[in-house]
Amino acid sequence: MKTILIIGGGLIGVACALRLQAAGVQATLVDPGDARRGASYGNAGHIGSEQVTPWSAWSNVLRAPRSSFGAGGPLDFRWRDVALWGPWSARFLGACAPARFARGRAALTSLLAQALPAWQRIADLAERPDLVIPHGHVTAWSTPRGAEHGLAAVAAAQWGAASYREMTRTELARYEAVLARPPEAAILFSGTGQVSDPQGAREAMLASFAARGGEVLTAAAARVEANARVTLTNGAVREAEALLIAAGPWSRALMAQLGVNTPLIGERGYHLHSSETNWPHDLPTTVFEENFIAVSRFTTGLRATSFVEFGSPDAPGDERKWRRLRKRIGELGLQFSPKPDRWVGSRPSLPDFVPAIGRLERAPRVLYAFGHAHLGLTEAPITSELICALATDKSPTIDLQPFRVERFG
Ligand SMILES: Cc1cc2nc3c(=O)[nH]c(=O)nc-3n(C[C@H](O)[C@H](O)[C@H](O)COP(=O)(O)OP(=O)(O)OC[C@H]3O[C@@H](n4cnc5c(N)ncnc54)[C@H](O)[C@@H]3O)c2cc1C
């Protein structure tokens, strides 16, 4: 294949554009240009190679009442969007069946085994090895009871290619400088990491793509066709040998135009981001499990993220979520700007939490890469390598059968 139109310029689309270009494919990236719209902008920046367990698990269903926003947890549903998440939830329950759960975990294990090395490879390609910080991440508990439960759950779970160990008292004491009190216990993962800044990483890949002559069209695709013809919202028509649908949660509408029903939902998350911080650069991303927040130090400051709110990716943010996040930040005693950046965005989630990566069976000129849910930052570079293999008629390094979009019927 010599030419491709990539629809969507989030982390997935941008990584694919850079990787395809490096393989000699003339790639054109189509994106409306609002950087804050996609989850690629505001995420926690964690390269989560350890997250091999799909969220579609009975343990999560049973935990749902305790995890609800009303009970102080992160889980919420936008009632106005019940027509979206109602049918999606039915499929989610189906995906929790033990055999499907096991298949999902095997698929994620194969994909995530290469996630961190693939990040290092694409950072090298962009001539920005500093984008990737492979210093692991931390899960911490503030109370003895939380620590006891948390450590037992960690010991019982699977972590793919990542490993972990309990942190020492001396290591925990480092948190004294940034928290009201250090955690009771914590574990440090290795084989995981973070990016130096999510939007910075996206921009660096985009800059590298453009510097090598890559074309970026600032427009939205209004109509996509199986023969790889795209009509833009400004009326212009573009054609190529192939098309890649990589528009995050908005891929659903584009796939519908191609006759494919894709059960994608917006699983919305929130952040507060402070440019002021005393959190050191070498203190890894830390998940405070009992507070339901992840804290990440980026070159641009300190970011706290939380919440899993099912609804439309285009709905406005819920003020209560930002207030709750602020409260959690106060409880932990983090130094934070009085006027932090507030953001809400949507994880593009499929009911079985396995991304859709492949070539459309009914229209072979169409490739797709979306539905990366909680792991789109982690999986963007490995996804780009798999898409590149398909586009250049090479064998993908992993079996793509479990990632077929046709699995949803
Ligand atoms: C709070 C939060 C924290 C997260 N933390 C992490 C983390 O730590 N690690 C991790 O791996 N993942 C994390 N994620 C998930 C990750 O951010 C997403 O999976 C990922 O960003 C999805 O990337 P994407 O490129 O598929 O979609 P998006 O980022 O949504 O990009 C899609 C792009 O397509 C464009 N588009 C839409 N429609 C059209 C059209 N018709 N034509 C052209 N372009 C179009 C959009 O404008 C957008 O720019 C987090 C998500 C959230 C919300």
Image (spheres, helix red, strand yellow):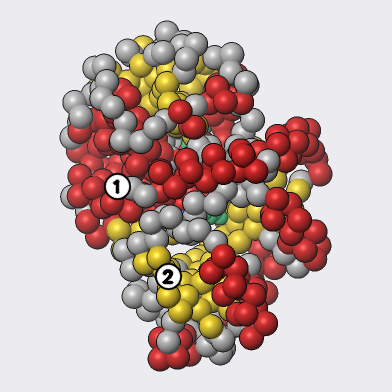
Q: Which of marks 2 and 1 is nearer the N terminus?
A: 1
The answer, for residue 365, to whether it is visible in the render is: yes
Crowding near pointer 1: few (<14 within 10 Å), some, many (20+)? many
Quadrant where the N terminus is found in the figure: top left
Displayed quadrant of residue 198: bottom left
Q: What amino acid type should be assigned to the residue bearing mark 2?
A: Tyr
Q: For this view, does 143 lie left or right of residue 383?
A: right
| Label 2, label 1: how far apart the Cα atoms are | 21 Å
Out of 356 and 332, give the one closest to the viewer: 356
Quadrant containing the C terminus is top right
Between 141 and 182, which is closer to the camera in this rendering?
141
- Residue at image x 62%, y 80%? 148
- Taking the spot 20% from the left edge, 50% from the top edge, the residue there is 124
Residue 51 position in % (x across, y down):
49, 55
Q: What residue did someone put label 2 on?
A: 164
Q: 324 or 185, which is in the foreground? A: 185
Question: On the image, numbered disc 1 is attached to which residue?
Answer: 118
Residue 30 lies left or right of residue 372; in this view the side is left
